[in-house]
Image: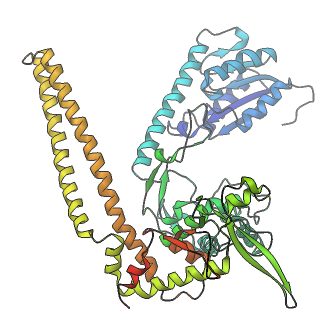
Amino acid sequence: MIRQPNDKINYLYGRLSHEDELQGDSNSIINQRKILTKYAEDNGFTPYEFIYDDGFSGADFERPAFSRMMEDVEAGKVATVIVKDMSRFGRDYLKVGFYTEIVFAEKDVRLIAVNDNVDTERGENDFTPMMNLFNEWYVKNTSKKIRAVWQAKGKSGERLAVIPPYGYRKDPDDSKQLVIDEESAAVVRGIFRLSVEGYGPAQIARTLNGEHLLNPSGYKYEHGILQKARPCKDPYFWNTTTVHKILDAPEYLGETINFKTWSKSYKDSRPRLNPPDKQMVFEHTHPAIIDPETWDIVRSMREHKRRAPRYGNPGLFSGVAYCADCGNKLYYYTRAIKNKWGTRYEGSYSCSEYRKDVQYLQNRKCTCHFIRESQLEQLVLEELRQLLRYIPKHEKQFACLVMDRSAQEQKRDTAAKKRAAAKHRQQIAELDTLIERLYVDNVSGRVPDERYEKMSVKFEAEQAGLKETVAALEAEIAGEENQAVNVDRFLSVVRRYTEIEKLTPAIVHEFIDRIIVHEPEQARGDRRQKIEIIYNNVGVVDRLALMGLGA
């Protein structure tokens, strides 16, 4: 359509939301166009331009066609806006009133709602505000229904996220299920492998950029996984945030996490992060890309972040070594040693609390606790090798050693606690029945109010005490059972190794929770230094007791 520069526009505006589509064809864009064009031609609103927004809620006023129309209204280019009914214009009472009663009035724009018999040129319609309120109530009610449906789906374990995580795609036979997308899953496995090898997120991002691999957004766009995705500025650029998200995503273990975010209302749909206790986790909902052992190693390494020194590689024990006296971490640093063969870097550790006050000798709160990395590596490697010599041959004895000599007594004690908890639960249920009967007798007049009050208070107090006892027993039982499970997890790590030739970050974090480093001692001119290794899941292992298991 060709317009003269000074002509004002007659806009015919249509809108359809996904909810409106369920109502049939009466609100379809085609039907709206038919109604509006006939009205415009029959009443002389020519020339006109039909514009529409498809798939947008009436509560959302950031619609492309609507925004374009309002820009022309603000610029004074619009004469008339015609809609099928007021709900097509919008379903927010306050915003609709602002646009129609203030903006349109100031810009001298005529508004016509064909089916609602609204025409601002004929004066105010007393029923228009009521219609706007009803339209807002409709979208509010619809929002509640949709939210209830999503809550039910989420609590049943059905995946709520529409877009599959990078590394997965929707199952062609069942769109609710995820299957592994091998091409992108290989990249995910590579990212976890690099993390296990000691690379940080920034280093991993640089590696991926060097390999010229599509980033997740670029991959989804190129492969049509996200149909409405916009092309990235640089689909081959990886940043540290993307790597962080992949390394922290439990979806790669085969888990579905629902209710990660929430929104206040249909008027404010901005996603807000839900605290972990309000999220719901469902295990084994789809194939895992990463095995639990690799996940645990990466978790441990990310909890103990390693600071890279100016020269050389990050410390092998950074984030794991702690001071025996003040409890703070040991800092890792390197010094360059030059000789005729070149330059080598020697790594060392010392107490972070000591190094904070290195310029103020009188204020130091701790001593140095200096230890060379080579020395610490030798001590740790020797102890790990000793574990591998003895434990595989004596797993049962080792389990008893860790769980104490009284493991059988503890097992009997746990069984007794389970029986006691079951008995208390039965008593709680019986008290529920008594309270219900007492209430019925009180209502029927068989039990006076005063007696009812005394007895109900007594029963409820007894019930509350039983519930506290059951909760305490369950916590004790869980702790005792977890101890046995943790020993099995440690043994599963030991079984994966027959010999350790050299320590790696992965091996350190698989076996060790922390290393306690003591201040060195001088004995007969020799420097001696004690360390204590706290192993994952089992704590300290008594070396003498371990050797006593036999060769």
Q: Is residue 369 left or right of residue 483?
A: right
Image-quadrant location for residue 542: bottom left
Residue 48 seen in render: no
Residue 181 seen in render: yes
Name the residue: 63% across, 72% down. 317
Q: Is residue 115 left or right of residue 66?
A: left
Q: Position of residue 524 (x, y in %)?
A: 61, 82
Name the quarter where the N terminus is drawn: top right
371 shown above or below 151: below
Q: Position of residue 383 (x, y in %)?
A: 51, 81
Q: Is residue 369 left or right of residue 210?
A: left
Q: Which residue, as the protein is rendered here, is positioned at the far right?
A: 5
155 shown above or below 100: below
Name the residue: 68% across, 58% down. 353
The color scheme shown is rainbow
Name the residue: 68% across, 60% down. 352
312 shown above or below 441: below
Please count the marks in the image: 0
Q: Position of residue 315 (x, y in %)?
A: 68, 72
Q: Which residue, as the protein is rendered here, is positioned at the far left?
A: 446
186 or 27: which is nearer to us?
186
Name the residue: 71% across, 73% down. 348
Name the quarter where the C terminus is drawn: bottom left
444 or 537: which is nearer to us?
537
223 or 442: which is nearer to us?
442
Q: Position of residue 465 (x, y in %)?
A: 24, 37
Image-quadrant location for residue 99: top right
Image-quadrant location for residue 62: top right
546 or 395: which is nearer to us?
546
